[in-house]
Image: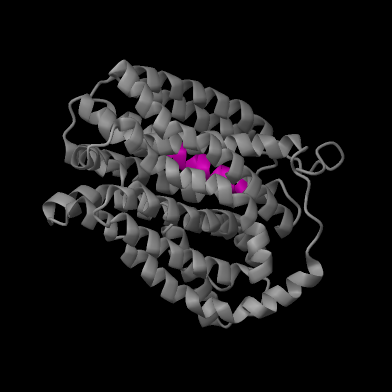
Amino acid sequence: MISETNIVHTRDYSRAGLWLLILGIVLVASNLRAPLTSVGPLIGVIRDDTGISNALAGMLTTFPLLAFALLSPFAPKIARKFGMEMTLLVSLLVLTAGILLRSVPVVGALFWGTALLGMAIAMGNVLLPSMIKQEFPKKMGLMTGVYSVSMNLWAAIASGISIPLAQGIGFGWRGSLLFWALLSAVSLLVWLPQLRYRHQRSAAAQGTVAPAANLWRSRIAWQVTMFMGLQSLCFYVIIAWLPEILRQQGVGSSSAGWMLSLMQFVSLPATFIMPMLASRSSNQRMLVGITSALLLTGYIGLLGGSILFMPLWIILIGIATGSCFSLAVMFFALRTRSVHEAAELSGMAQSIGYLLAAVGPTLFGFIHDATHGWNVPLIMLSIVAVLLFIFGFGAGSSRYVLSEEKNIR
């Protein structure tokens, strides 16, 4: 339960101002997945309507990931220059423009709009975790849970209502995707009041910004980065192709979309609880082991193809992906000593990590086209789950990125 007495923040807020900040964080987080997860259930319809291949359809998920990879290292620098508040506001404007553009009835606009919204989401991905560390340093676990649940809740809703919006209400797939411009527009309006802190933040930052942290030689930073990348690869491959996998196994289109939604809904409790468990643990290795085992079990279950046990495998994968994401985000704060380092680690991990993840949807679509089945892709995902444990075991050690040998907590 969030209350004014158990939230510790770094600047003086009125009661209304504090709750407006929390609401703003919740709404910005809500936009970081919904415009992407709304595509998965519709990808077969989009492919058939536009005549593109499975591999090219996978690019609808890959383009945003490439944008994450390209922009993430620059997000901390942009935010230091213009302020986090203004940077996030502009990203919401760009996000809305991208959603509008991809709904224009031209194939090229579909891809350009997708790339544009990916650029906008990249900024929020990097900046929100560091803003939480900055504004709520004593309640990072709680606020990270709130942020993660908001993001995944709306991601689940988007997956579940995409087909009903397109077919049930009759919006068509373009109208279904366009729907999410409403959420980004509302978020933009709610975030506007935060601009009053921009000049105060920028002036303070000019005197306090430390030299750029050299994370590229840090073993812990690379382990966090690989953990981030592998969990993202798992998530986006499933988001892009789970409905198609299920349809090939005999599940109907609408049911397949709701199974994807189920996966994300069941992730919500783990997404909320995991950051608090992680923040209270001396290290997070046991948590990494449990989540990796759940993920591997779910993939092996999907590989078996039993429709009877399908909900169980989907639930295991959902719990695991939610937990892994929350752990990855918490590592940005837990493995660093300052807000500056957290932002730099977030930028590095999301840049390299999402570049790795970007390979997933297109590669798995290509492998499916080549093998005419989903067994090989699912075997590959099982191997990724094992790698996730290996890198997560290192990332979960109780050390800081710039002091692995000298400073052990």
Q: How many marks?
A: 0
**139 displayed left or right of 39:** right
Instruction: Depth check: give the residue in front, 309 or 302.
Output: 302
Instruction: Depth check: give the residue in front, 225 or 323.
Output: 225
Residue interval drawn in magenta: 319-330
**397 displayed left or right of 258:** right
**168 displayed left or right of 148:** left
As drawn, 312 above or below 208: above
**281 displayed left or right of 44:** right
Q: Quadrant of residue 402?
A: top right
Residue 142, percent from left and from top: 55, 57
As drawn, 130 above or below 90: above
**What secondary structure predominates along the stretch shown in magenta?**
helix
As drawn, 210 above or below 401: below
Q: Quadrant of residue 219?
A: top right
Say whether residue 281 is visible: yes
